[in-house]
Every structure is written in structure tokens, then in C-alpha cells.
Image: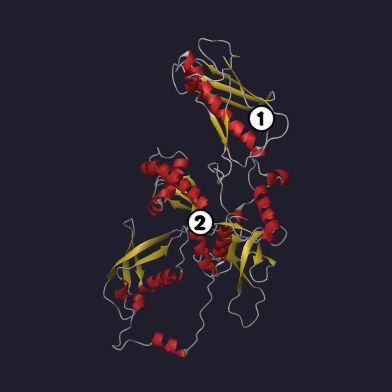
Amino acid sequence: MDRTGCFPSCWLLVLGYVMFVMNHLANPALNWDIPLQRLTGNTVDISILLRYPFWHKVYANIPNATFPSDTREQLCWMVGFSETVGHAMTYKLLTCDTKKIIHRSSVRSAEDPSTVNVRAAPVDGESIKQHIKSKHDVLQEISTAPDGHTPNLPIDVTGRSVVIPQENGEKLRAKIIETIGNNSTKDENTEFRLVYEKSDIEEVLTYQQIMEYLDEDERNQRVWKFNRISGHQGPLKQSDSDYKGSSFNVMIEWENGEVTTEPLNIIAEDDPVTCAIYALDNGLLDSPGWMRFRKLARRQKKLFRMANQAKLRSFRTAPRYMYGIEIPRDYQHALELDRKNGNTLWQDCTVLELSQLKEYRTFKDMGKGKAPPLRFKDACIRFRTNEPDYTDLPNRPSEWDKSIIGDAIEMLPHDAPKPLGKRVVMTHYVDANLYHDWITGRSVTGILSLLNQTPIDWYSKKQSTVETATYGSEFVATRVCIDRAVDIRATLRYLGVPLAHRDVVWRQ
């Protein structure tokens, strides 16, 4: 819902759509089996999932359109799939005008004008004949030129290409190279010599036959695109029945659902990238007929990586919605949304939010003339090299102690909460595990902090200095412990925990 911008009231439709998709996809919890297939034992069909995403705008036909009407289609949102109405390719649609659920199978995309609804629109061979609207159009078509010659002479087709269907179902393109003999008075008796492309085969056709092929080619201007390569056949020899001019044939799945076998040479010229991907996925780059795609497949790895990065980038920059309203990314995007929507709602929200902001206080606040921040000197057990008694707590530390402890200071704001109740003591155990890493000689700092004998924090990290001495590692660990103690004490003071004036630090 945050990606499509659907209405908040469509939450149940969203839940049903997600459940339908999850039931038709492999689940790792079921050993990569499909839940619906595990339940029924039948192979599921996911063709309906691949056509339109959720909340995609589509056009659906109106069965009982009133007269007069500008169109027989209505704009809808795709919100699910009909499991109990119609056949397997029936969609559940939400009308944009009445907000009602309808079930339609003949739909076409409203966001992609190039996508043609094959089942709703007439396909080749079923085109409706054009009705004659005026007699002047017919008279103009049959009228002769002013000089008495017919406008379409046989010589006009020389040099043109024509698609000729073969007996095995293939369609080959041939080029008209010359006219045989002199032009006769009857156009249909004139013969032309044609040469098929990528071969030396010639054929002789009459003018009437050529005009029929040209007329058929002009009427069939729809270009079908293929979805993917699903298989291959080969290597083939010229004596094989499936040989079509190439040592390999590939099985093509077209967008209209048809599956045909085409020669690899033809498909490689049209789409070499798809052929390279298929050869890489099936381990055919070392085969004689597929070695030409080896260089392209190496570059394809980089293209795949860039494509995946582009997908992630597009996902991060994709518009997001909440309650059906697009959320702006920044202030400039908010202004753009206001211009698009024709209002100033986002600008008003920004002004309202800024007007509600008060003075922001930080830890650098000195109280504005009030009492200065409280200063708490962090107390810990001092240690000296010439005095092993750790219970010695001198009132005034020496300069050598300051170099190790750093004279840590706590600073709290003037309005910090005043702790009440019995004060609790924090205890820290710190040690440096010498030569923990035998390869580099690094030590590991280990710290355990307790509050009233209850562990509340721990720290363990390898030191960056290699081959440190005994005192060096211990000094580093002690300094880290003091810094963490100051941070923990400040956090507990903000929470109102009554702490003792001194912490106890135990070290080796």
C-alpha cells in the first residue's frame, strides 16, 4: 500500500492479493514447494501473475454500454484475481468511477499504449471490413491518371521486398530484382524475378501474385515480440528435416503465447543479448555454434550487476504513499506535488510544522544565567606501579595518575533530574588478554559493568596495536573502561537513577 498508493479501504483486497501470490509461489518452509500444489496435487499456473501488477490501471469493456457513448471501455484498477468467476485469466477490477468490484477477462493496459489486448481487439484474419462511406472515395480510387496510364505500373515494384510464406510455415523475405521480358498491357501477366535474402534461390512470380503478398504484408503490420528463449535444438546438419539454415534452432515463446522454432542465426541478429544470456545459463558458451556470444556474456555480468544496482536505486527513489497520498522526499518534491495537484497543502503543512518548533536545548546549554551545569568528577580506584595496594585512594592524584585516568569529567545540564532514594554502586571489571592473537600479537580488551552486582553492559574488542607490552595493554583497557563508565553514568543520571559518587574499577 505504501508503494502503489491505493486507498486505505483496499486493505482487504491487498491482503487477498498477497495471499494469492504467496500460495502460487515456492515456499522455502515447504522445501521450495508451492503451497497450492502441495494442497491440491495439481501444477499451478502463474500466467495471470505476470501480466499486470497490483493497482495497475487497465481498460475493461462495458457489456451493456448506453447510446450515445464515447467509448465501450471503462478505466479500472487491477486489485486481484477471480477464483470463482470466469476462467483462469479473469481479473478482479475496481472501477474508478463507481468504486465497485467487477470481473473481466478482456482487459488492456491503460499505462502502456503500445500493449494491445489481443483477445479484445481483432487479430489478423478477423479484421472488420471497412464500410464505404461515400461514393466519391470509390470514384477517386478507380479513376485513371490524367495521362491515361494506370497509376500502378509493373515496373514500380522492382527493388521492393516481399514476404512469401513457405509450405513448412516459415515466412521468407525476397527482393524483386528485375522484370522478365517486356511489359505487357495486362499487369497480371507480367513476371518478375525474385531472390530470397541470405540465399541464392530465385523464384518467378507474376505481378498479381506480388501485389497479393504486398497487400497482405501491409495489412499485417503488427510486430510480435518474443518473451524468452525456452530451449534449443542442435547441432543440425543440412540433411536433417528441422534444418532451417542454421546449425542450431531455438525455441521462442512469443508474447501472444505461441511457441515456434527459429534458426539461431536470425534470432542472434535481432537480439544477441538474450541469446548470450541463454547460452550462459545453459553452459553453451564453449559449443561451436554459441562461442560468438562468449565476449558478450562476460560483459553481461557487469550489466547484470549494474541492472541490480539500478533496481535497488529505483526502489529507494520510488514514490511512497500513505493512506493513498504520495509522501514527498524533500521540500522541493513537496512543492512539485503541490504544483501537480493544483493546491498548496504540502506548503501549508510545512509552515504549520515550522511554526510549532520551539527553542531546541542541547547539552551545551549553560542555563541562561542560572546555575552552571553540575560537574561530577569520575572516581575510580587509582593505581601506582610502586604501590600494589589497590585500596589506596589518594585525595589528590598525582600527575602520573592523570595521564592514565585523564581526569575524566561529567557535565550535566542544570535541569537534570534530581535522583531520589538509596544510591547504587557501579562496578567495572577490566582486563587485557595479552597476546590473544598469536599471529599479530594483539591483545583484547574485556570490560564487564555491573549495577548493584547485576551485569548491565559488556565490551570486548581486539586492540589495534600489535605486540604491546603488559602495561601498555592494561593502560589502554583502563582508559576505555573510564570512557565507557562516564557514558553509562551520564545515561543513568538522565534516567533519574541515584548513583554513588564513585565507581569501583577492578583490574589485574
Asked where in the image residue 413 lies, by quadrant, the reply is: top right
Asked where in the image residue 8 lies, by quadrant, the reply is: bottom right
Circle 1: is it few (<14), some (14-19), or many (20+) Cα within 10 Å?
many
Q: What colouring style does the render use? A: secondary structure
Q: Where does the image place residue 461, in percent across and percent down from the top left? A: 53, 24
Judged from the image, the secondary structure of the residue bearing numbered disc 1 is loop
The residue to which callout 2 is attached is 330
Q: Where does the image place residue 454, in percent across and percent down from the top left? A: 69, 25
From the image, which quarter does the N terminus lie in? bottom right
Q: Nearer the viewer, residue 128 or 280?
A: 280
Instruction: State the mark number for residue 351.
Output: none
Instruction: State the mark number for residue 499.
Output: 1
Q: Is residue 118 visible?
A: no
Answer left or right for 303 relative to 126.
left
**Residue at 73% over, 45% down:** 39
Q: Where does the image place residue 235, in percent across and percent down from the top left? A: 42, 42
Mark 2, mark 1: which one is toward the viewer? 1
Q: What is the number of callouts on the image? A: 2
**Residue at 57% over, 27% down:** 378
Q: Nearer the viewer, residue 455 or 205?
A: 455
Q: Residue furthest left?
A: 182
Circle 2: is it few (<14), some (14-19), or many (20+) Cα within 10 Å?
few
Q: Nearer the viewer, residue 404 or 1?
A: 404
Q: CA distance from mark 2 to mark 1?
A: 44 Å
Which amino acid, mark 1? Leu
Q: Is residue 379 visible?
A: yes
Judged from the image, the secondary structure of the residue bearing numbered disc 2 is loop
Q: Is residue 81 above or below residue 276?
A: below
Which amino acid, mark 2? Asp
From the image, which quarter does the C terminus lie in? top right
Answer left or right for 290 relative to 456.
left
Q: Earlier in the sequence, mark 2 or mark 1?
A: 2
